[in-house]
Image (cartoon, rainbow, N blue to C red):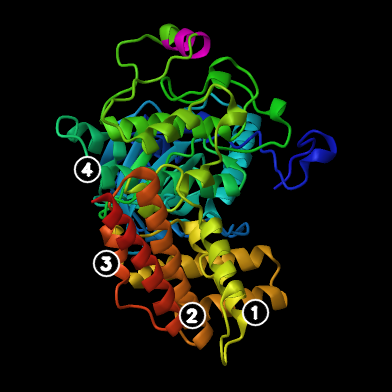
Amino acid sequence: MRHPGAGGGSGDAGFVRADQIDLKSLDEQLERHLGRPAERAASQHGGSGSRRGESARLGLGEEPPQAPHHQRRREDWEIDPAKLVIRGVIARGTFGTVHRGVYDGQDVAVKMLDWGEDGHRSEQEISSLRAAFAQEVAVWHKLDHPNVTKFIGAIMGARDLNIQTEHGHFGMPSNICCVVVEYLAGGALKNFLIKNRRRKLAYKVVVQLALDLARGLSYLHSKKIVHRDVKTENMLLDKTRTVKIADFGVARIEASNPSDMTGETGTLGYMAPEVLNGHPYNRKCDVYSFGICLWEIYCCDMPYPDLSFSEVTSAVVRQNLRPEIPRCCPSSLANVMKRCWDANPDKRPEMAETTKRKGWINHSIKGPESIADHMYRMALMALIAGDLPAVDRERCIKIAIVHDIAEAIVGDITPSDSIPKAEKSRREQKALNEMCEVLGGGPIADEIKELWEEYENNSSIEANLVKDFDKVEMILQALEYEKEHGKVLDEFFLSTAGKFQTEIGKSWAAEVNARREQRCGKQK
């Protein structure tokens, strides 16, 4: 999707500008409308003398009329309105009403959007809104990530369109549009935090929620999408308390030229200084907002509850005001907050950097190794290992390099997450397939898949050896972190004990444990 004049010269390769993708301006028409579409439909179809108009006015009655003879081509993201049933209201807000519903047997949330705004828009304006909306949903339709709300589809509106409710059918005017997404039973993250305001959350829950949000944002940024309104109110929870990013009302495709993205957007308290100032911005405005959300998740409190808009704007921009981090907050978490809400966007990390190896973060390890560091060290182990009879050393190195490559995309899923092994494997397999698509397929992509599956299935002596290197590298890191941070990380040593499959793995593990015992002995 490329707009005429996108970007700033030759530097726009790989980036797409989409000035028209702005659902929030479209969402402002949401219900004040669902309560009245039937009445508008009735008036459009001929007044009180029409049986069809009367049944539409009552929201009841006849079977859906036959579709018009002329049918335009249905887009990939358009769904069949005959399969949609609209039920009760979930929530009402400034930008409309969301309804619960069922689509083709699946629980969904439904937004109703009226293009005509009671006749106050011109045909040209309606046409422009429809085109902008079509572009937005075409982008959203392609998003697929466990931490992003799943877009089911949309109905653009057509003449004589009927929607089923629990009370029958109502005629939907051609200016009405439906947006259908998965229904998430856990509600907004903000409400969950409010419920836990007094007792706070366990640290591992804080880390889990934060990493879910970070992974979702990292994925959006990898697709060149800037959310622009990151806040806990726009994050939803499913039944397993997994965070999913929602409300793409002001999301935009990131422009290659920063000056092409300006204007105040977002929510007070979460807005980055450059946005408050009306200066050019990029995806780093989401990183700033993530830092505020991270503080909110840890504290279960509101940022700047007693300050007005002007006070917050002035203090954040001119006095570098930020929420006060409690003294009890682990330094590793506090450092992430501070880096994310740095006044200089260039000093803020990429979202991908905030999803480093979770097992270490759970133990308050500051600056843990990255997934790339982990894979590199394992490859070195394969390189420096002694004589390895009947082992293809080069294949060991390759497996070590790619074995966690999918984890670099979906994040470090640990046993404490309570995610079944099959689901973990499914997520990683999907991420791997997407990566291979980006590579354009071919022999290299096929080899990466083959190496990863060989490791996952433990189907060769090389895979066995790399699995041992994986565990050796982990306990070696644990030993280093114990020394550096003065911590006791017994669980990493206990969880690997007796699980080494190769002689070299057993030998190296014994050496690491011996060093640990020697160090502990000296400290006594």
- Nearer-the-camera pick, 470 or 148: 470
Q: Residues within 10 Å of mark 1 (few under 14, many from 20)?
A: few
Q: Is residue 349 magenta?
A: no
Q: In the shown orientation, is residue 17 left or right of residue 344?
A: right
Mark 1–mark 3 Cα distance, whole angstroms, equals 31 Å
Q: Earlier in the sequence, mark 2 or mark 3?
A: 2
Amino acid type of the residue tagged 3 in the rendering: Leu
The boundaries of the magenta stretch are 312-318
Nearer the observer, disc 4 or disc 2? Answer: 2
Depth check: give the residue in front, 63 or 325.
Answer: 325
Instruction: Name which of mark 4 and mark 2 comes first in the sequence.
Output: 4
Check residue 175 in the rendering and tell me which mark sits there, or answer none. none
The kind of residue on which mark 2 rests is Leu
Would residue 463 be found to the left or right of residue 184 on screen?
Answer: right
Q: Amino acid at mark 1?
A: Glu
Identify residue for label 4: 202
Question: Residue at coordinates 48% horizontally, 7% vertically from top-left?
Answer: 314
Per the image, the residue denoted by label 2 is 465
Image quarter of residue 385? bottom right
- Magenta span dominant secondary structure: helix
The span from disc 4 to disc 2 (Cα, nearest Å) is 37 Å
- Residue 351: % across, % down: 52, 42
- Label 1 to label 4, Cα distance in Å? 44 Å
Residue at image location 43% in from the left, 68% down from the top: 472
From this view, report whether residue 153 is shown above or below residue 201. Answer: below
Sort mark 2 into few (<14), some (14-19) or many (20+) by Cα contacts within 10 Å: many
Instruction: Determine crowd level at label 3: few under 14, some 14-19, many 20+ residues with C-alpha closer than 10 A.
Output: few
Mark 2 to mark 3 CA distance (whole Å): 20 Å
Can see residue 250? yes
Q: Residue furthest bottom?
A: 390
